[in-house]
Image: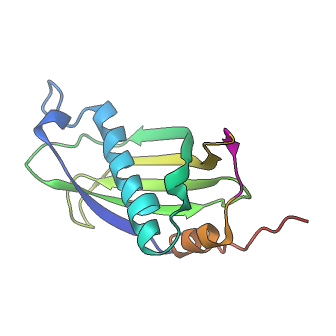
Amino acid sequence: MSRFHVEIPLRWADLDVFRHVNHARTVTLLEEARVELVFHRAARDGADAWRDGLLVASLSVDYKRQIPYRGQSVRVSMWAHQVRAASFLIDYELRTGPGEHDPVAVTARTQMVPYDLVAERPRRLTDVEREFLSRWGDEAVSPVRAG
């Protein structure tokens, strides 16, 4: 399995009254990491159609431990799986610091749906998108063909 890793800096505004990262801000950190994968990295790799529409259809988050603020970044690891004709899942591990051995503070999952903003409906994944996801997945992703 190949995972995509990114460091996201913590900001003072991410803290709550208890001086650790607020649960809602944690979802924002996951979003920032996801943007790095499905928009920035995907565009560099030629899979840039998601810029025209990609929705979060569902989100689940499990908080394992607090994320203290020490002026550090957090490390988010992501991988894609259950790639279907018009959706895929991204799983996340968010660590308390930038190192691969820092404790996992959060695990999460989003179901992503490519979306045609003009037609206002979901669309099928392209072969290029499927190939991109296969690089960051835990299972083989084969092209889906209509027919």
Residue situated furthest right in the rendering:
147
Q: Does the stretch in magenta take in 119?
A: no
Q: Quadrant of residue 99?
A: bottom left
Is 69 rendered above or below residue 17? below
| The C terminus sits in image quarter | bottom right
Q: Which segment is the magenta one?
A: 120-124
- Name the residue located 55 percent from the left edge and 60 percent from the top edge: 49
The location of residue 122, given as percent across then percent down, is 69, 45
Q: Does the stretch in magenta take in 123?
A: yes
The location of residue 14, given as percent across then percent down, is 19, 36
Q: Is residue 72 left or right of residue 45?
A: left
Q: Is residue 33 left or right of residue 117?
A: left
The location of residue 54, given as percent across then percent down, is 55, 48
- Name the residue located 18 percent from the left edge and 28 percent from the top edge: 16
The location of residue 79, given as percent across then percent down, is 49, 63
Residue 138 in view (yes/no): no
